[in-house]
Image (spheres, rainbow, N blue to C red):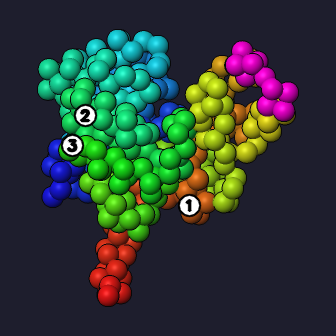
Amino acid sequence: MNRVTQLFGIKYPIIQGGMIWNSGYKLASAVSNSGGLGLIGAGSMYPDVLREHIQKCKLATDKPFGVNVPMLYPNIEEIINIIVKEGVKIVFTSAGNPKTWTSYLKERGITVAHVVSSSKFALKAQEAGVHAVVAEGFEAGGHNGREETTTFTLIPMVKEQIQIPLIAAGGIATGSGMLAAMVLGADAVQMGSRFAASFESSAHDNFKNTIVDVKEGDTQLTLKELAPVRLIKNKFYNDLQDLYAKCPTPDELKSLLGRARAKRGMFEGDLIEGELEIGQIAGLIHEIKSVNDIFTNIISEFEFAKKQILENSF
C-alpha cells in the first residue's frame, strides 16, 4: 500500500492514460478489474456517449475507475455535470487551469488529479487543491508539454517541489520502467501507449498494428504553435513538414490539420491521412495483448528488476 493505491483504493500503482479514441469503458473496466485504475477518455466523447460509457463501466467493474477530462474541449460544463450525476469518484483533469473545476469536484466528494508537464504547473496544481499530480515527460504520446522535459528529469524535479502524491507518465510501459520512475520519487505510474495496444482498447486494429511496428525515431513532437502533439510519421506528418518548410502561420497549420484528424487515424484506421498519436515507448511494444496479460507482465518485470537491483547493489 502506498499513497496512490490508498488514495484511489487500487491494488497496483498503475493508472491507464485516458487517451482519446482508445479509452472506452472496455479498456477502463479491464484495467480496474486487473488491479489498476482505469480511466475513460472523455476528450473524444460527446456528453451522451460519455454517459453511456460511464454506465457501462459501472456494470463491467465493481472496482474504482475514473474519467479523464481535457479542459480545452467544448461542452466541459455538461461533461462535469454528467460525471457528478453518474457518481464517478475520480477525475483526472488536463490541458487547462486546475483551479477551474477542482474545488467544485472536491465539494462533491470527487478525488482529483491533474496532468502537468513542469514543476511550475505541478505547484499550481497543488495550490489549486488537487489530491495528486501526474507529471508527464516529453516522451509521451498525444498532447504534450512545450518544455520538452524528459520524464527522467521531470519526476525528481517535481518531487522536490510538491508534497502531494506524484504519478509519473511519459515513456513508461514496462515493469522496469515503473521501478525506475518510483526510484526517482513517483508514487505510481500512468501508462498510455502500452494500453493503446491492447485488445480492449477502442482504437482501430490498423492503429494497434502500427503501434507494434513503431521503431525508435518513428515518432515526433510537432504542431507546437497550436498544441504540441507527438505523432507517428506518416503522410499527414510529412505534409506538415512540407508546410513547415514554408514558415506557415498558425491559421495555415489549422487549415491543414482540419477537423477530426485524430479520430480518422486512431479510431477509423486511416494510416495515411490520419493523426496517429503514440509515445516514444512504442518502440518497446511488440505485441497486442490483453490488459490482464499486460498487468501480469508488468508486475513480474517489476519484481524481477527490483530483485536484480538488490542482488547487484554494492
The first of marks 1 and 3 along the sequence is 3
Disc 2: which residue? 126
x, y percentage for residue 110?
19, 28
Q: In which quarter of the image is the N terminus?
A: bottom left
Secondary structure at numbered mark 1: loop
Q: Is residue 40 above or below residue 8?
A: above
Identify which amino acid the numbered label 1 is placed on: Ile
Lower position in the chain sequence, tag 3 or tag 2: 2
Residue 130: percent from left, percent from top: 24, 32
Q: Mark 1 points at which residue?
A: 285
Q: Is residue 221 left or right of residue 112?
A: right
Q: At x 36% / y 17%, what residue is drawn? A: 79
Q: What is the magenta range? A: 244-254
The three-letter code of the residue at mark 2 reads Gln
User: How many marks do you count on the picture?
Assistant: 3
Residue annotated with mark 3: 164
**Magenta residue check for 248:** yes
Give the foreground label among 1 and 3: 3
Q: What kind of element bears circle 2?
A: helix
Residue 246 visible to an observer of this rendering = yes
x and y, in percent, of residue 38 in the image = 33, 43
Instruction: Please name the residue shown 50% across and 26% down the image.
Output: 44
Q: Are the residues flagged by discs 3 and 2 in contact, CB closer than 8 Å?
A: yes
